[in-house]
Amino acid sequence: MGILTIQIRSGTMMNMDSNVALKLAKAAIEKGHKVKIFCYGEGVTLIKAGQNPKRFPNVGDILEELASSGVEIVVCETCGYARGIQRGEEIKGTKIGSITNDFSQFVSESDRLVTISR
């Protein structure tokens, strides 16, 4: 099967974009595809540990589940630092990386790229 990279540029609580992206990831995995997720801009908020939404799905829990199933999840370091997210605050199994190295590698390895953004 192929490799799908999903770029998420929307934050955890701004709208339902991240939920749509993670449902897409789960569906692709169920079909036998390999999935990679790269978060950029507001999307970096998805990997912040300790999320505790009251009336929304817990994106952090879903990401941790995806990471434990082998999905590579990386966020842009520059975008994270700009939003106050430091190394060590990321959800288990996710990584703070770079658009230059990680995202370009994801794209070069992937058969398809989907960007979820506002």
Image (cartoon, rainbow, N blue to C red):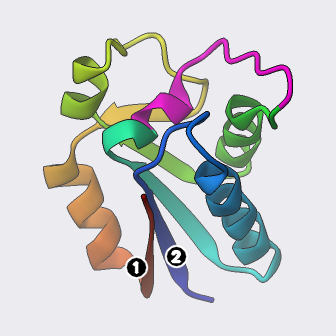
The Cα–Cα distance between marks 2 and 1, rounded to whole angstroms, is: 6 Å
User: At label 1, which amino acid type do we have?
Assistant: Ser
Which residue is label 2 attached to? 4
The stretch of residues the image draws in magenta is: 44-55
> Residue at 67% across / 40% down in the picture?
63
Q: In the image, what residue occupies the spot 57% across and 66% down?
A: 35
Looking at the picture, tell me which residue is in the foreground, 52 or 94: 52
Q: Quadrant of the N terminus?
A: bottom right
Determine the residue located farthest toward the left in the rendered image: 100
Q: Residues within 10 Å of mark 1 (few under 14, many from 20)?
A: some
Query: Residue 86: x and y, percent?
Result: 34, 12
Residue 56 falls left or right of residue 24: right
Which numbered disc flags the more N-terminal residue, 2 or 1?
2
Eyeballing the image, is 117 above or below 32? above
Q: Which mark is residue 10?
A: none
97 vs 85, left or right, is left
Residue, disc 1: 110
Dot 2 surroundings within 10 Å: few (below 14), some, or many (20 or more)?
many
Q: CB under 8 Å between callouts 2 and 1?
A: yes
Q: How many marks?
A: 2
